[in-house]
Image (cartoon, rainbow, N blue to C red):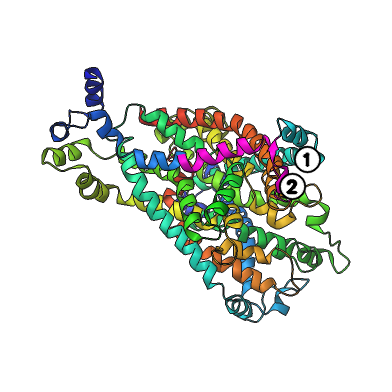
Amino acid sequence: MTIALKPSSRRRAPFRDKADRQGLGLTVLAWAIGLFFFIPFLWMVLVSFRSETDAATNPPQLFAPFSVEGYRNFFGADPWGPLLNSATASVLSTALVIALAFPAAYALSIRPVKKWQDVLFFMLSTKMLPIVAAILPIYLFAQFSGLLDNILLLTIFYTSMNLPIAIWMLRSFLAEVPVEMIEAAQIDGANLRTTLRQVIAPVVMPGIAAAALICFIFSWNELLLARVLTSTVAQTAPVYLTGFVTSQGLFLAQVCAASLVVSIPVLTAGFAAQDKLVQGLSMGAVK
Amino acid sequence: MSTEVAEDAVRTGAPPPAERRQSGMSEKWRRRLPLLPALIFVIVLTQLPFLGTLIVSFMDWNSYYPDDRGFAGFSNYARVFTDVNARSAVLVTVMLTVSVVVICLVLGLLIALLLDRKFPGRGVVRTMMITPFLLVPIAAALLWKHALYNPEYGLLNGLLTVFLGDDAPQPDWVGSMPLPALIAAISWQWTPFMMLILLAGLQSRPMDVVEAARIDGASSWQIFIHMTLPHLRPYIELSVLLGTIYVVQNFDHVFTITAGATGSANLPYFVYQTFYTAQDYGRASAAGVVTVAGTLVVAMLALRTVFTVFQEESR
């Protein structure tokens, strides 16, 4: 199509010209819709680099003097604690998820247990229970055990939240590992741990990385559990952002700066895992 | 036992000679062992809390009145079904979910079809399309609430001023139309999700068959209706069901943009409010159980669809 677009003027056949015009129209439409979806984000970036007075004008300005006032105000309010808490909960829970999901995926694909399909669908069904339906007992347990406002408790629940997704994803990757390779290793006397670590892991590393990035995104994004289970000490970045829900005078540049900074890890992880994003979100059902 | 082993051996290609010699543990348990930690973890942390909710839903339990705790029978459920706010929450959840999923599906399919062609800058457009989905949900909700919807300095009213002059209408978007405001903001985030699944579906089409049809004189429209759509069906079902499961549970947008004001609280927000603000544990749990019952119907359908795709894949 790209080649067909350029020499269109030189070609005389009317049929070709019509097809090219149609192609050009579709290209323009694709760009228009893409931009339409991108504009709110672009606007957020633009506004975040303005002074508060330039940020909140009506009519809006396309170009305004560059300023880091929003970022200065955001970082001036010391958001490092919440950002660090989010990083802790997301990274720890992701590591835990992979450590638990990798052997489980092995037992569901390469050397499957008897009812491996039932186990897989049980895992999937837990993702369909709304978190609100479990939040009260979790809160009461946290209160009872003194783990309220403790980042480790949140880490544990993020692990259980993401474990099913990781198992599904890893299972679909492990299913592609050639059986001969594993058998050869086991004939050589390798036990399960060695097989997993030295034979399978190197082959499915891209899959493990993708699963890890997706679990990281889901943990980083989570608000409801964090809002209920944490307060001052262990609050995460999304909980910190709830402080911006009610308007406080001129603060638009700061809101945009804060939203952007908190989203940067997810944007990075998401673009890194772009090709595997669908697979993760559809629990490995779509390749 | 012997037939089992034989079957398993067929599945994995050959008997595992090394493992059988190793220890006294039966083959069954050796297979189960790597699975158990994950399985126990998930059961304890997802099933037990729900069981707790189920129990509390039959109790009188408000933490403001700690002495009145006791068995309540079905009275919490009766209150959920007769309470105006609770019934409104059910209705809002249904409307929100259906609107968002339909909008996302139509837009997502359109964009997926556009992105399935090769054209200059396709990668850039694809990246731009994915961006909304890669914002932290509450950050995206804040963006819509303050930078776009704000009646005084939001971009929407700003654009109205630009195009219609100084006496342009300046509606209070969230205040006057809370549900459409929520639907637009949530659809913006979830359309890329639908688009990605459908695009994956489009790109898994056997192109030689499509080419053959084209050579035989089939029009683009005929190819779309008779070949593309049937092929996309499982992907459409999957995106609708997964979208439904995620959108039904939406909390962040409702919490941020409307805070449930003027009849825009959905079930997750209603449960949160009843439990967190009103501290009525019994009633919150009953509402939570009702949410699960509603989700269960969709979930069953979802499981079946995933299962179909799953079996096609493993064939």
Secondary structure beneath dot 2 equals loop
What's the magenta region?
A: B44-71
Mark 1 highlights which residue?
B88
Q: Is residue B49 magenta?
A: yes
Residue B273 location (% of width, % of height): 71, 50
Q: Output the chain of dot 1.
A: B
Give the residue at x 74% y 48%. Answer: B65
Specify whether residue A200 is in view: yes
Count of numbered tags = 2
- Label 2 marks which chain's residue? B
> Which quadrant does the C terminus of chain B fall into?
top left
Left or right of residue A5: residue A167:
left
Instruction: Identify which residue, B142 or B160, lies in the foreground.
Output: B142
Q: Residue at x 46, y 29 (%)?
A: B307
Determine the residue located farthest toward the front in the rendered image.
B67
Q: Which residue is mark 2?
A: B265
Q: Residue furthest right?
A: B167
Specify which label sits upstream in the sequence, 1 or 2: 1
Magenta-span inclusion, residue B152: no
Q: Nearer the viewer, residue A123 or A229?
A: A229
| Of residues A99 and B144, the one drawn nearer to the viewer in this rendering | A99
Q: Quadrant of residue A188?
A: top left
Residue beneath the point at 74% across and 73% down? A56
Q: Is residue B279 above or below residue A243?
A: above
Q: Residue furthest left?
A: A188
Look at the numbered discs 1 and 2 and tell me whether their residues touch, using CB distance below 8 Å: yes
| Quarter of the image with the N terminus of chain B in it | top left
Question: Residue B264 at what x, y percent from top left?
Answer: 76, 47
- Are marks 1 and 2 in one subunit? yes
Residue A76 - label: none
